[in-house]
Amino acid sequence: LGAAPPIPPVLPTSPEYDVEPIGEGANISTYWVSSGGAAPWTRLPSARASHIVAARKIKQLMKGDLGSPVLSTPWFPGKERHLLRAQIARITATCTLATSGYYEPDDTEIAEGVTRKHALRMAEGALESFPGHETLKTMEGWVHAAPAILSTGKCSWPDLDGLEEGVLPQETIDAIKKQKEDEGDPKELLAGIGEDLAELKPEGAEGSPAWNIKEYGDKGQYTFPGSTKSYRITAVRSLIWPGAISVAQGTRFANLYVGNALKCATLVGPHKETGLPLAGASPFSSGNMQLPLAPEDVMEEPVDQEECEEPQPPLVDDASDGDEMDKE
């Protein structure tokens, strides 16, 4: 048998482009859900870019029924299971952290000349070089361990250079290039968390508007034969998605989320220039509109305009004035 024919690229205008392959982007992991107790586990569908984009425009509490419709404005193109999967993708992309130096990009080939996108592997000597407590309580001790999601709902831009000429209309290609130029490349995998929401950080302020780091537990240092040990726990709490937390103790770390899958605008400070809250996080916002938490100042009374004569001369209508029409 001869070699298998090459797989044609997925075009940005095709339905398949809406879903990233399993193991890449927002679909690196597969999720199962249950209502608790002896209820069965149900596999959630793959995350779709169109669902992620639509989920950013609404604020909706879950009902617990995966098959129930999502009644919202703007319209959401799916059921509650699709909204839940989209919110999981958003929270995972923002709040999945790792200690610095623990992971490294995995460039292992799964086929000849083919590597997995957004793949990570444990770095050599990661446990021996695990960050200490002084580093973990700073922003430099933590990095993002999940790919960031672009405004398109995907984690990467389409490879337009690899397409044959004439496959896509030139208008579509120009629109994608313009969007990429305006937004730029996605945040690199394993990028530090110190630059998150840097545009909201006031001049000279310390820390990050997006994260809060605190130490818990026994902070004592205990001496063992050949080593010292501490049982303190370092926790990094997300201020964008309340309920998302990353913790580290010893040479171990974990990520956990317990919440209602809604952003929060009260923990993150307003924009330092406009004074507006975080986009899409205001409790009364619709879509991605940035609505202030307080009403705007009342406008002053407008200047009275000079009155002018009626340009159309009035018609003589004696009857309307109550005069008798028949006069002798």
Image (cartoon, rainbow, N blue to C red):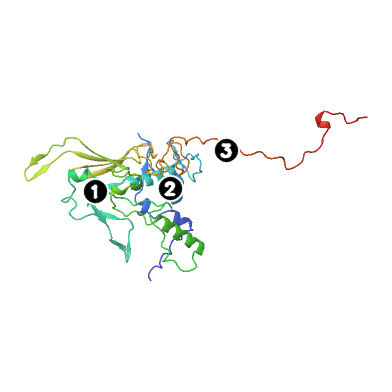
Residue projecting furthest to the left: 225
* Amino acid type, label 2: Ile
Residue 196 - label: none
In this figure, which residue is indicated by the disc labeled 2? 52
As rendered, which of 302 and 94 lies closer to the eye? 302
Q: Nearer the viewer, mark 2 or mark 3?
A: 3
Q: Position of residue 123 (x, y in %)?
A: 22, 55
Mark closest to the chain's N terminus, 1 or 3: 1
Q: Position of residue 228 (x, y in %)?
A: 10, 43
The label number, if any, that marks residue 140 in the structure image: 1
66 lies left or right of 112: right
The local crowd at label 2, few if under 14, some if 14 to 19, many if 20 or more residues have their Cα within 10 Å, is: many
Q: Determine whether, in the image, residue 132 is placed left or right of residue 194.
A: left
Which of pointers 2 and 3 lies earlier in the amino acid sequence? Answer: 2
> At x 28% / y 54%, what residue is drawn?
120
Are dots 1 and 2 in contact, CB under 8 Å? no
Q: Residue at x 13, y 37 (%)?
A: 220
Disc 1 residue type (three-letter): Glu
* Residue type, numbered disc 3: Val
Label 1 packing within 10 angstroms: few (<14), some (14-19), many (20+) = some
